[in-house]
């Protein structure tokens, strides 16, 4: 009976990944972001720049609040009310994207709605990631994290299929399989594509239910006097002593850079394909399905590799692959591949970009699952929400770098292709910092290879 309860708890935790993944797949990457840049903003370059500045401001806000909220949550009683609050913000923001009309004059409202949804998403992830260490023994955490990420990717693929087959209209006003958008939505007003916002909100509201039913509250259920003050004091002590914890410090710095670069690829990949290669929403959706299917497979495979060899080799391999694919992306457009000219009308740039999507999916899925496992190894088991608050801070403290540098480079050069080049530098710097990260935290040597499946028992 206890085993069934533990398995149900793990599946409830998986369902949070299932519930929120369409935000990444449908809104941030493959459908809404390209639609905003191509149809809502005045022109694609302006849309890419506006999108970049919006993500920059949202990221700064998350970076400032994430570690504070994490520290307070570890000292201030139950966490479930916090997750309910973040869920309300998420659903409200996503639903607001319905009003992103083509060529509309409500750009600020649309950007604010997206930012609100993203804030709800990111804070919810902090609190649910903190549950990960309690789901199984330490040697199984990598497998659990990878399986959860893979499960989420499957949700992204399924949601993307539904949108492409029945809602998002192409230039001819029909969906991928030639149907009119469902429920009589008006293709001329792009209502099929705009429905992606309410769809994402409804998807979350339905599929987050198993999380709330199957993952019970753990730890203290009551707020103790002085909990907020104590949480902030402990956070201050942790930040002050962080430079002395070299492995954790190096890991937060490395993940800060490579996750920022990865988010840049996810965020601007579809926008890049729409503006540089002239792809339609349907083509970008197929690209997204390819990346998501491969990402699900490699998140699962990466979870097994993580449990066998530890998260560090998985992270290093993923970042190296992203450096290679970024070099390929910035040297490819309609006229060239790897900087070499191609014949007019050649399909080679399209093929290369589909291959890039597969590599991004494979590396990104394994990398993100292994990254949260590594945070579990580096953090304090007694204050894991605070740890993942710092992890969120490391992911957002320089969140302005990728979108900000892309926006700045795009503005200065007027070229979307040149605009994404800074991602290569972010990945390279993150890879260098991983040299100082110890596989099992402060207690291990950076070059030591721990034996697989070592149980952490007294």
Image: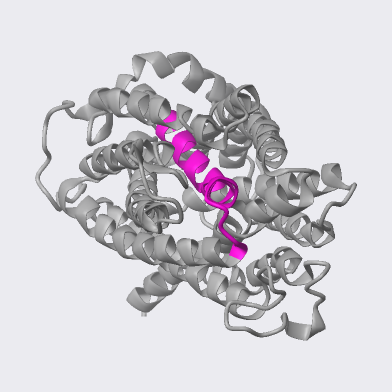
271 magenta-colored = yes
Number of marks drawn: 0
Q: Quadrant of residue 80?
A: bottom right
Q: Quadrant of residue 245?
A: top left
Depicted 252 relative to depicted 181: above or below: above
Q: Looking at the picture, how far across and down is residue 420, in whole percent?
A: 50, 34
Q: Nearer the viewer, residue 429 or 39?
A: 39
Point 57% across, 25% down: residue: 409
Q: Looking at the picture, how far across and down is residue 365, in whole percent?
A: 37, 54
Q: Nearer the viewer, residue 57 or 183?
A: 183
Q: Where is the N terminus found, in terms of image quarters?
A: bottom left
Point 47% across, 53% down: residue: 131
Identity of the residue furthest to the front in this view: 344
Q: Looking at the picture, how far across and down is residue 366, in whole percent?
A: 32, 52
Query: Is residue 406 left or right of 54 when viewed as pictured?
Result: left
Query: Is residue 339 left or right of 212 when viewed as pictured?
Result: left
**Residue 389 visible in the displayed image:** yes
Point 74% across, 54% down: residue: 39
Point 55% across, 19% down: residue: 236
Q: Nearer the viewer, residue 106 or 209?
A: 106
**Residue 252 visible in the displayed image:** no
What colour scheme was applied to this rendering of the protein?
Answer: one colour
Q: Which residues are magenta?
A: 256-281
Depicted 426 relative to depicted 151: above or below: above
47 magenta-colored = no
Depicted 311 relative to depicted 172: above or below: above
What secondary structure is the magenta-colored segment mainly? Answer: helix
């Amino acid at each position: 009976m206890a085993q069934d309860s533990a398995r149900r708890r793990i599946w409830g935790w998986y369902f949070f990944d299932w519930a929120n993944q369409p935000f990444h797949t449908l809104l941030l990457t493959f459908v809404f972001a390209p639609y905003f840049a191509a149809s809502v903003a005045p022109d694609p370059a302006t849309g890419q720049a506006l999108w970049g500045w919006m993500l920059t401001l949202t990221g700064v806000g998350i970076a400032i609040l994430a570690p504070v909220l994490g520290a307070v949550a570890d000292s201030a009683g139950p966490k479930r009310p916090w997750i309910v609050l973040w869920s309300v913000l998420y659903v409200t923001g996503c639903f607001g994207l319905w009003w992103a009309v083509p060529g509309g004059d409500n750009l600020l409202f649309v950007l604010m709605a997206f930012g609100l949804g993203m804030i709800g998403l990111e804070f919810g992830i902090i609190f649910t990631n903190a549950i990960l260490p309690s789901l199984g023994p330490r040697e199984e955490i990598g497998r659990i994290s990878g399986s959860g990420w893979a499960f989420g990717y499957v949700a992204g693929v399924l949601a993307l299929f539904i949108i492409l087959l029945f809602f998002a209209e192409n230039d001819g006003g029909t969906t991928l399989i030639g149907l009119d958008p469902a429920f009589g939505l008006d293709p001329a007003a792009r209502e099929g594509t705009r429905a992606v916002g309410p769809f994402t909100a409804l998807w979350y509201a339905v599929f987050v239910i198993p999380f709330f039913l199957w993952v019970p509250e753990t730890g203290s259920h009551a707020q103790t006097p002085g909990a907020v003050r104590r949480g902030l004091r402990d956070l201050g002590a942790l930040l002050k002593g962080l430079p002395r914890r070299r492995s954790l410090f190096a890991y937060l710095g490395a993940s800060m850079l490579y996750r920022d670069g990865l988010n840049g690829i996810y965020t601007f990949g579809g926008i890049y394909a729409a503006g540089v290669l002239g792809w339609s929403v349907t083509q970008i959706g197929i690209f997204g399905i390819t990346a998501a299917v491969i990402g699900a497979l490699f998140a699962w495979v990466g979870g097994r590799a993580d449990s066998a060899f530890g998260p560090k080799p998985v992270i290093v391999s993923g970042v190296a692959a992203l450096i290679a694919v970024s070099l390929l992306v910035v040297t490819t457009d309609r006229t060239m591949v790897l900087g070499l000219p191609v014949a007019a009308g050649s399909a080679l740039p399209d093929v290369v970009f589909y291959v890039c999507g597969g590599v991004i999916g494979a590396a990104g899925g394994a990398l993100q699952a292994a990254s949260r496992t590594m945070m579990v190894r580096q953090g304090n088991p007694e204050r894991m929400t605070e740890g993942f608050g710092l992890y969120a801070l490391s992911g957002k403290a320089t969140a302005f770098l990728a979108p900000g540098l892309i926006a700045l480079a795009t503005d200065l050069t007027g070229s979307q292709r040149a605009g994404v080049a800074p991602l290569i530098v972010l990945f390279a710097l993150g890879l260098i910092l991983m040299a100082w990260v110890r596989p099992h935290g402060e207690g291990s040597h950076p070059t030591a290879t721990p034996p697989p499946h070592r149980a952490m028992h007294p």
